[in-house]
């Protein structure tokens, strides 16, 4: 049976996991050759069973190359000399890394070196700019490819895609992602369509898309971006430490507050992550940390919880609100009071999951524990991606508190504590139900 292995690709660097890189060997350029993966300090190949242009497309994008031209098999670029790491690869085509595609477990295959998979990509030469905005951090998104500037279609265009553009241009984070040629119609080619970014890629061209020049759009669908530039910062004021207090934003050289209309733990979670303050413990309103100055910058904030910044959440236009200073929103974050470790495994990337809270190490109950939850732990510990998520105290029973139960992760959280759970210390489990993790790294 095939297993789907999932990981988070930090800043869209060409990493499959901690300790595993990807490269093309024996080609005529950096964008062609035999596909090889580095895992457990050893380079190995990919078997060509089912290997096709869609799989090759993912490799090309992951390596910062352009569209896949061909996906040759049968060791077209020569036989590899190491292990065969992957077999039966099945990609949808919009994955940001080959490891996000379906495949057998690493190292499990029915191939020999004469079946090594290869890739031929066109070489990427695209640049990016924003046109017709109020400044260099807003405008219509345009790409330079084959010496011609062209636009991006707004099909599916959203704040995650815009966030990538803003970061790529050194313009902070995305405030808005307008479509419908908000900044006027472009006159050249439409280079990209159906863009789908996770939000952490370092280049728009690393996001899922149809392939440069492939689209079903018109110029009135041109995508745009409004970025924060360097003018918006965030801080917490009047708390007991840097990770608690009244939420304040610096905009137009003036600090202002956030209204508590609709303010909740999900919104606070974004602030805590943005400030590197762990996870949100509470989201007090009603000027819990005292009233701010006259200016209120944000109102009706609605986050889904995985945004990179508060400004990426839905909210009214900056400065538009119906609030008073008695409604200022606040945040209490965990700070660094909770740590995580794996115990009794074969290395630091496998073992029983344990959390340090209130100066006491405790375990996680395996109720509902699955590979998605394990994925978060592996990423949090810098251990690559999850290979398995054993329960039933597979790595032995813990002796302390049981801190978490009924954990439900989406898989893209930066910390296990950001996932849904019953609340620290609330459980109906015994130590024989301790959850474990086996990660790819070591």
Image (cartoon, grey):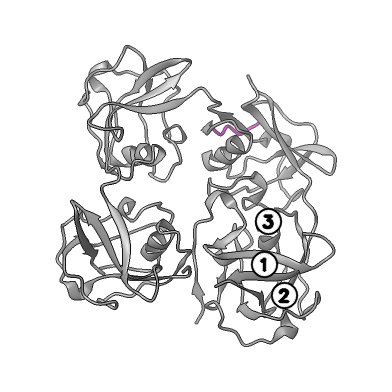
Image position, residue 254 (x, y; %):
42, 15
Q: Nearer the viewer, residue 404 or 368?
A: 404
Q: Quadrant of residue 327?
A: top left
Give the spatial CA distance, label 3 vs label 2.
16 Å
Mark 1 or mark 2: whose residue is earlier in sequence: 1
Give the spatial CA distance, label 3 vs label 1.
10 Å
**131 on left or right of 357:** right
Mark 3 or mark 2: whose residue is earlier in sequence: 3
What kind of element bears circle 1? helix
| Residue under label 2 | 117
**76 on left or right of 49:** right
Image position, residue 122 (x, y; %):
80, 56
Give the spatial CA distance, label 1 vs label 2.
10 Å
Image position, residue 208 (x, y; %):
62, 53
Q: What is the span of residues highlighted in magenta in the rendered image?
A: 176-182
Image position, residue 313 (x, y; %):
43, 36
What kind of element bears circle 2? loop
What kind of element bears circle 3? helix
Q: Which mark is residue 61?
A: 3
Label 1: few (<14), some (14–19) or many (≥20) C-alpha neighbours in 10 Å: many
Task: Please identify, in this view, whether the residue under mark 3 or under mark 1 is nearer the observer.
Answer: 3
Residue at 62% from the left image edge and 47% from the top image edge: 195
Q: Which mark is residue 230?
A: none
Marks 1/2 in contact by CB < 8 Å: the verdict is yes
């Amino acid at each position: 049976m095939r297993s789907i292995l999932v990981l988070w690709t930090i800043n869209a660097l060409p990493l499959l996991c901690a300790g595993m890189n990807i490269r093309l060997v024996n080609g005529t350029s950096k964008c062609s050759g035999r596909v090889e993966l580095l895992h457990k300090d050893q380079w190995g190949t990919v078997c060509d069973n089912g290997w096709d242009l869609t799989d090759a497309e993912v490799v090309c994008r992951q390596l910062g190359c352009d569209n896949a031209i061909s996906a040759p098999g049968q060791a077209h670029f020569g036989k590899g000399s190491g292990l065969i790491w992957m077999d039966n690869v099945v990609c949808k085509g919009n994955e940001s890394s080959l490891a996000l595609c379906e495949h057998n477990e690493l190292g499990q295959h029915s191939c020999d070196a004469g079946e090594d998979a290869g890739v031929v990509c066109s070489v990427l030469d695209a640049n990016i700019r924003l046109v017709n905005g109020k400044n260099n951090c807003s405008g219509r998104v345009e790409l330079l490819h084959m010496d011609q500037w062209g636009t991006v279609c707004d099909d599916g265009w959203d704040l995650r895609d815009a966030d990538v553009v803003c970061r790529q241009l050194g313009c902070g984070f995305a405030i808005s992602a307008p479509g419908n040629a908000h900044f006027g119609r472009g006159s050249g080619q439409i280079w990209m369509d159906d863009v789908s970014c996770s939000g952490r890629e370092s280049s728009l061209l690393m996001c899922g898309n149809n392939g440069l020049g492939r689209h079903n759009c018109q110029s009135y669908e041109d995508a745009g971006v409004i970025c924060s530039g360097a003018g918006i910062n965030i801080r917490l004021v009047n708390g007991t430490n840097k990770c608690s207090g009244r939420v304040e934003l610096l905009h137009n050289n003036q600090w202002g507050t956030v209204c508590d209309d609709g303010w909740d733990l999900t919104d606070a979670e974004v602030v805590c992550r943005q400030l590197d303050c762990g996870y949100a413990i509470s989201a007090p309103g009603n000027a819990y940390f005292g009233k701010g100055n006259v200016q209120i910058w944000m109102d009706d904030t609605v986050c889904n919880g995985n945004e990179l910044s508060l400004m990426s959440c839905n909210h009214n236009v900056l400065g538009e609100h119906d609030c008073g200073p008695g409604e200022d929103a606040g945040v209490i974050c965990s700070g660094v009071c909770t740590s995580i470790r794996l115990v009794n495994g074969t290395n630091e990337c496998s073992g029983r999951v344990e959390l340090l809270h209130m100066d006491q190490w405790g375990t996680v109950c395996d109720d509902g524990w699955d590979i998605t939850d394990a994925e978060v732990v592996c990423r949090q510990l810098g251990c690559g991606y999850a290979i398995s998520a054993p329960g039933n105290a597979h790595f032995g029973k813990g002796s302390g508190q049981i801190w978490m139960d009924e954990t439900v992760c989406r898989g893209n959280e930066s910390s296990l504590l950001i996932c849904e759970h019953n609340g620290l210390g609330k459980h109906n489990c015994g130590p024989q139900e301790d959850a474990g993790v086996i990660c790819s790294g070591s």
